[in-house]
Image (tube, rainbow, N blue to C red):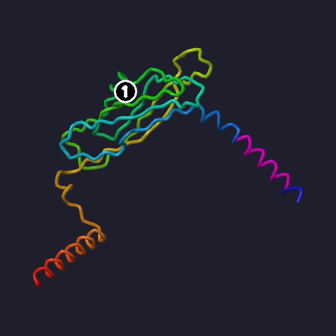
Amino acid sequence: MKGFRLSLVISLSFMGCLLAGTPAKANSALSFTIVDPYQSVVSGTTVVAFEATVTNPSDSSVVMYLNGDSPTIDSPLTLDDSPYLNNFPLSLEPGDSYTGLLFNVEIPSDASLDLYTGSFVIQGEIDPDGTGNSGDTDTLATAGFSVQVTSADSFGDFVPEPSSLVLLLTGLAGLAGTIRRRLVR
């Protein structure tokens, strides 16, 4: 019984230490959301734009410096990150937020009909003591996205669900019954 109590005390102490370290990390987390991360386009579309919101939480006590990015996308699609580099702020004070065009995905004309995935990593520095940007880069936030390239014909190939068919048939039966009653009178 003493061994069980001792292992319980050690386990609870260890979990307490882990939980004690969590708020410090949560306090310095950059909130990063791509507005519409899953986009579907018809083959022949050349550019897809992705917007995002980046926020330094108001309960944060640190300045976030946005030093750069590290995007990826499946080949043969390419990613143009110049909107992020040219328009996003260089730093975010606690409580600051920015929404804007993050990047463009360029789709070549020979891209096959497929689902292409990628990720966008915001790199930067967390400045806890307010001494300024030292140039060190860490990963501040990461978000995934995808582009589904489809044919123009595929948008007309949807098969309705059984419940939609039941609803349609019920409506048609009601309409037929109403017309029949009016004709009989």
Main secondary structure type of the part rendered in magenta: helix
Q: Is residue 97 left or right of residue 4?
A: left
Numbered range of the magenta stretch: 5-18
The image position of residue 28, as x and y in percent, is 58, 31
Q: Residues within 10 Å of mark 1 (few under 14, many from 20)?
A: many
Looking at the figure, which quarter contains the C terminus? bottom left
For residue 8: magenta?
Answer: yes
Say which of 7 and 166 sits in front.
166
Say which of 78 and 5 sits in front.
5
Query: What residue sits 35% from the left and 44% below the top?
Result: 146
Looking at the figure, which quarter contains the N terminus? bottom right
Tell me the quarter of the picture where residue 20 sits: top right
For residue 93: magenta?
Answer: no
Q: Eyeballing the image, is 117 above or below 126? A: below
What residue is disc 1 on? 84
The image position of residue 21, as x and y in percent, is 68, 37
The amino acid beneath tag 1 is Tyr
Residue lying furthest front:
185
Tell me the quarter of the picture where residue 119 sits: top left
Say which of 119 and 53 sits in front.
53
Numbered disc 1: secondary structure: helix
Query: What residue sits 80% from the left and 48% below the top?
Result: 10
The image position of residue 105, as x and y in percent, is 29, 36
Q: Eyeballing the image, is 149 above or below 102? A: below
Say which of 33 and 14 sits in front.
33
